[in-house]
Amino acid sequence: MGRLLRVAQAIDNLSEWIGKSLSWLVLLTVAVGFYNVMARYIGRFLGLQLASNGLLEWQWYLFSITFLLSFPYILQQGANVRVDFLESGWSDRRKAMISFWGTVLFLIPFCVLGLWVTVNPVMQSWGLLPDGTWGRWEVSPDASGLPRAPIKSMVLVGFGLLLLQAVAQAIKYWAVWCGYIEGRQLPEAEADLPPLE
């Protein structure tokens, strides 16, 4: 069990690093959005074209990356929506058992299904043709738009990282359920801790 918990800790560290790094991406998204708005109004005033479809799509891409890659961090931090009123009277072991089975029966299969249904569209976006050869990758239909293949690949990356974090959560829930670690060590249990004095 010690090795599995070390694997879970390594996945937690990865999710936490990605989650904290995304905060800078949020600032960049806001900056690009601010520029887009200012360029549109100033361009109208000056009679110049200062904004572009590429910058608008870049803002959309940044937001999509933040959205897709933040789910593992949310799960790792225990900030996802939970039905706490049902769990309020349960022991830590019972909570861990329910969370373990929910993760194994629902979250992990959802991630696997998400990966399975997105592989082909992503590969086609990169230019994979039905005959197995490679063609041109998908680009935006808008003038001066960006390639679509890289952002579509983020769907695969997001599902892959969420699957890794789901496995880490399942390991931790199993460890609590079997008594290897205390339930209060899980992030979602922090709300149950008494206030510091």
Image (cartoon, rainbow, N blue to C red):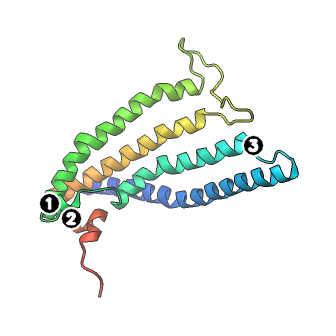
Q: Is residue 132 above or below residue 89?
A: above
Task: Say which element carries label 1.
Answer: helix
Task: Say which element carries label 3.
Answer: loop
Where does the image place residue 171, in percent across and percent down from the top left?
26, 52
Q: Of the residues shown, which amino acid type is indicated by label 1?
A: Arg
Label at residue 52: 3
Residue closest to the far bottom: 197
- The residue indicated by pointer 1 is 93
- The residue indicated by pointer 2 is 183
Q: Are marks 1 and 2 in contact (CB under 8 Å)?
A: yes
Specify the quadrant of the image occupied by residue 104: top left
Q: Are marks 2 and 3 in contact (CB under 8 Å)?
A: no
Q: What residue appears at the point 49 percent right and 55 percent down from the top-left corner? A: 18
Distance of mark 3 from mark 1, alpha carbons?
55 Å
Instruction: Bin the neighbour count of mark 2 within 10 Å (Cα to Cα): few under 14, some 14-19, many 20 and up.
Output: many
- Quadrant location, the C terminus: bottom left
| Sequence order check, earlier mark of 3 and 1 | 3
Q: Of the residues shown, which amino acid type is indicated by label 3?
A: Ser
